[in-house]
Image: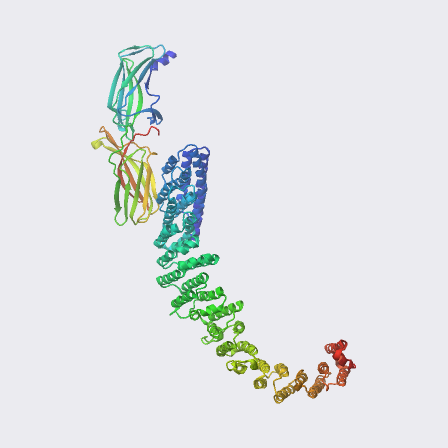
Amino acid sequence: MIADGAGEDEEKWLAAGAAAFKQNAFYMQRAIDSNNLKDALKYSAQMLSELRTSKLSPHKYYDLYMRAFDELRKLEIFFMEETRRGCSVIELYELVQHAGNILPRLYLLCTAGSVYIKTKEAPAKEILKDLVEMCRGIQHPLRGLFLRSYLAQISRDKLPDIGSEYEGDADTVTDAVEFVLLNFTEMNKLWVRMQHQGPARDKEKREKERSELRDLVGKNLHVLSQLEGVDLDMYRDTVLPRVLEQIVNCRDEIAQYYLMDCIIQVFPDEYHLQTLDVLLGACPQLQPSVDIMTVLSRLMERLSSYAALNTEVLPYFLQVEAFSKLNNAIGKVIEAQEDMPILSAVTLYSSLLKFTLHVHPDRLDYADQVLGSCIKQLSGKGKIHDTRATKELVTLLSAPLEKYNDVVIALKLTNYPLVLDYLDSENKRVMATVIIRSIMKNKTIIATAEKVEALLELIKGLINDLDEPQGLEVDEDDFEEEQNSVARLIHMLYSDDPEEMVKIISVLKNHFLTGGPKRLKFTIPPLVVSALKLIRRLPEEGDNPFGKEASVSATKIFQFLNQIIEALPSAPSPDLAFRLYLQCAEAANKCDEEPIAYEFFTQAYILYEEEISDSKAQVTALQLIIGTLQRMHVFGVENRDTLTHKAMGYSAKLLKKPDQCRAVYTCSHLFWLEDHETIQDGERVLRCLKRALKIANSAQQMTSAARGSTGSVTLFIEILNKYLYFYEKGIPQVTVESVESMIQLIKNEESLTSDPSAESFFASTLRFMEFQKQKGGVVGDRYEQIKV
Amino acid sequence: MNYLLGAFKPACNISITFSDGKNRKQVPMKKENGQTALVPLFQSQETLSGKVCIEPYQGKKVEHNGLKVELLGQIEMYFDRGNFYDFTSLVRELDVPGDIYERKTYPFEFPTVEMPYETYNGVNVRLRYVLKVTVTRGYAGSIFEYQEFMVRNYAPPPPINNSIKMEVGIEDCLHIEFEYNKSKYHLKDVILGKIYFLLVRIKMKNMDLEIRRRESTGAGANTHVETETLAKFELMDGTPVRGESIPVRLFLAPYDLTPTHRNINNKFSVKYYLNLVLVDEEDRRYFKQQEITLYRLKEDTSS
């Protein structure tokens, strides 16, 4: 309520002030139009008197100031005309000083001074010096700030800068700089003083008001940066020390923060680079509450992007030892500000790291040093729980990855894992994901066991949950996502050297086995695949003239694989283990390792018997077994017989008749392997098919008995297809007659017409036969013989 | 009618002209009725010469017992208005008794007249110079004609002109040190100076520099002192902090000032003071007054 009332009052005051202002401006204009200097001065002074108010907030005051500014432009033009008409500018300069009230007087003085400079009847520097001195009369912060900002405004284009038309004889740019610096200093003093005026309860409001005014002060720095004459030497020797002195001495946190930032933003990066120690030297001297982190971070950001855009300046960075200076400065700042929050420290180091990565991409030791310093800061503080700090830490750790696009570099940073340790497990996982993503994105191949070891250390948040507090449940989807990424990662760990690869794999194994059943499901398969890939790459044993097999032999890897897969059943994924065994068996087959292949098969069978109980899963598993077994050529007759027999047995024991039927006819393939004379037993093929037919019959009967309708003929058609297959292959036992009778059998089935899918299946089978017939050749001849 | 009117009209028209009247500088002077008129300007040691012209009205003769011109320097106290004290009186007899029938011109001259005091128009007193022509007549009363003129005396720049420097303060409250560049200023001078704030514990609204004129008339128990503030010039707006120095630059030209008159014929004196006034936020005034001496410097002929 009170605030509202004040606001309304302020509006009223502003309105009243503006009205009076307008009126006097009108009279002033009339005096100008009639070339009446005396009246023009009188009314302009009255007009400017409205600026003497203390009732307006900076915002409203600015409103009034802008009106004054516009009016004073007109007055300035009038003054200029007056001097052309013969009025002495010196007199004019004196005349305006007759005004009794100081504020209007000084506004007029500045305006007249501007004209004075333009006429060049006196050196610009003298007039400017006079103006900036006289402005001391306004000690009221708000009014003083605006007055001086007016002075800055009108003098901007009149500074005796190099190349300016107001440049004097010698060294006048010093005067220009001196002038701006002085005005800046005074403005800053006024600005800081605002903080200490008025009751303490209005602190917040005052700070808000002050921040509204800050650009008035900062503008001076901008003007300085625009001066042609401010070259590096001038900046280093005069401008910067003076500005910093003012900043440090004002002991005001708002001013210090804003102005430091201003310096960084306003002056060229090149200057910063050359004056780094001066600039940084000021940092520890600032008030402890100043957010120096942000300031330094911005500085480093700027320098980094400077370096990034202009690669030719990089040598300068080295020359001025930018990195060590920054590093030292940060250390000092942190030392100076004892209770600095972790967040700030981490942010600082993060920026520093980014800086060094950009500027000295070749100096890994620098990056490592940064991480080292960071650790020093973090040590003794335990895990970080501040979410923003951890976030920043993640950024920090991601920086090298982003920069180098190569995790291998990060692995070289010895301090990297130590920093990582300060994250809690959740963020460790996040970080690990980031690392993995980086690897995937850049397709980085990590080729030595040592690096793999280091990498795994980094991402151990994903690999095991040693220090995971119980009860902290990870979202299922997230977990899967993470583990999948680990799985993908495995394929990036690759070495052309088999020996090294074996090492890598064994390192991976050691780590993954600690991961618990939930993870194994995801991590083991890729590992196995990776190992199998290795096996394929191994030279044929006979071909190796150097006898290297002692170190890397397929046998060894197989043994190793066995160990890995063994771990799986303990996880609730027998299915997976089963498949992997079969995979391995197949690989062993390729390597002619009969005992090993047999062993894998045995394991698979055991799993089938003990763990796979779901009938659907059994069907699938059985199909896999048969499929794999069919291709195995490594086995001797005996072993193969055993395995085949077993598979047949499983088939017959399936629960559902159709499943049985299908399994049995599939088994027929086990006895016929093309290109392998040893495994071509037409008799048994036929026996299988016949048995399948029998089962199909009984299946049909069962359905008709149970449901009252005849069962599907689909099974028969499927069996027919098998017949055709083997017939085509030319197995003597599968005769034309048997095929023909099969077709006849199906045709006779009365249910054929009632089942559209079966009907079309049969039709397409027949079409296939017709098609094969048309093809001609040996196959065509065979089909020719079939009479439908 | 004509005859009747003529009876009340003075018998003749008297005019006084200065011989260098065309070239002499004229300055405005405030007359008693409040209007300003231009009068010629003289300074001490100058020679006043000119002509007195007596022109009887048509068909009249002026019979007189003598004709004289006087140069008078007079002081008039306003509490005793109309009573002039002549501190200077010079007389020239222009004619012996006789009759004037037609226009007659008499030259006169007061060579190197000592006019030590300047014309002055104060609150309670004025000092004027006047030429008075008297046609002495027996019966009809003498005829007078006055011509006022202004006297300004110029002084050379004083050989010794120290600055005024002083530290003043209220204990634990306010300590300032001020400095004015001179103690003696000419009337078109500019006062330069600085105010240093050594200690500021009060909240200030503003600081003004005033020029005050102290006109003291009479003597002894009858001394009457009148103080006027002729100029009020704001030097500072707001509260400074310790160590701040505020510049002073006050042009004297726009103000209606006279030279300092220490003692005019034991009748009156005029002194000038600079008064530095600080006003705090509760409108309390803190001030320090310093006398300055004003003098009139010979102006350049060009300006």
Q: Count numbered badges in the picture.
A: 0
Q: Is residue A379 above or below residue A576?
A: above
Work out whether residue A2 can be spotted.
Answer: no
Work out whether residue A105 can be spotted.
Answer: yes
Residue A217 located left or right of residue A524: left
Query: In x, y percent, where is residue B278?
Result: 31, 44
Looking at the picture, tell me which residue is in the foreground, B17 or A467.
A467
Looking at the picture, tell me which residue is in the foreground, A690 or A31.
A690
Residue A718 position by quadrant: bottom right
Q: Is residue A215 above or below residue A595?
A: above
Looking at the picture, tell me which residue is in the foreground, A520 or A384.
A520
Query: In x, y percent, where is residue B149?
Result: 31, 24
Residue A173 position by quadrant: top left
Q: Is residue A628 above or below residue B216?
A: below
Residue A471 located left or right of residue B90: right
| The C terminus of chain A lies in quadrant | bottom right
Residue furthest out toward the left = B220
Residue furthest out toward the right = A787
Residue furthest out toward the front = A545
Looking at the picture, tell me which residue is in the foreground, A541 or A49.
A541
Query: In x, y percent, where is residue A360?
Result: 44, 62
Query: In x, y percent, where is residue B97?
Result: 26, 11
Specify the color scheme.
rainbow
Q: Is residue A253 above or below residue A158?
A: below
Q: Residue at x 28, y 18 (%)?
A: B109
